[in-house]
Image (spheres, rainbow, N blue to C red):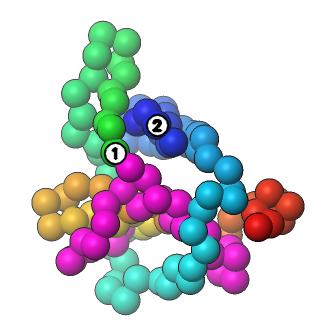
Amino acid sequence: MLGDLDITWRDPNRLHSMELRTSPRQWSRASIPRPRTPLETGQISLQLEYDTNDMATVDTNVAVVWDLTHARIAFRLAEEVASVRWVAIADTVIVGLDETGSLVEIRFDDCQIDAQATAQ
């Protein structure tokens, strides 16, 4: 994905890294509660069109929400989704999928972010 967020996969099913190119001062600050619905466990595989260099690009807006109280950060790829299915893909990582299976949110728990970087 290009823009404010790049996601790199080690292979089609394993997240390797994420690079966020925004200042923490640009992030929204809000409580990010745990999902009310039970979490499934599993993995995700992105259905993307890759070029000859095995790169896929998706042009989408990413809203970053930081919850200092719960040490949680969310990357929201869609606004106002009526129904979200939550899947735990790691101990501290959950993803939200809409009714079509599209990725709408990625959440990380137990995030340590430099307090000076997030000061307003």
Contact between labelled residues 2 and 1, with CB atoms less than 8 Å apart: yes
Which residue bears the numbered disc 2?
A: 3
Q: Which residues are magenta?
A: 61-87
Q: Position of residue 2 (x, y in %)?
A: 43, 33
Q: Is residue 2 above or below residue 75?
A: above
Q: Report the Cα–Cα distance between label 1 and label 2.
A: 8 Å
Quadrant where the image shows the N terminus:
top left
Badge 1: how crowded within 10 Å, few (<14), some, or many (20+)?
few
**Looking at the picture, which amino acid does disc 2 mark?**
Gly
Q: Is residue 57 above or below residue 24?
A: above
Q: Does residue 93 appear in the picture of this structure?
A: no
Kind of element beneath mark 1: loop
Question: Does the segment drawn in magenta span residue 102?
Answer: no
Badge 2: how crowded within 10 Å, few (<14), some, or many (20+)?
some
| Residue located 62% across and 58% down the image | 26
Q: Position of residue 76 (x, y in %)?
A: 41, 61
| Number of residue marks | 2
Which residue bears the numbered disc 1?
A: 60
Position of 46 compared to 64: left or right? left
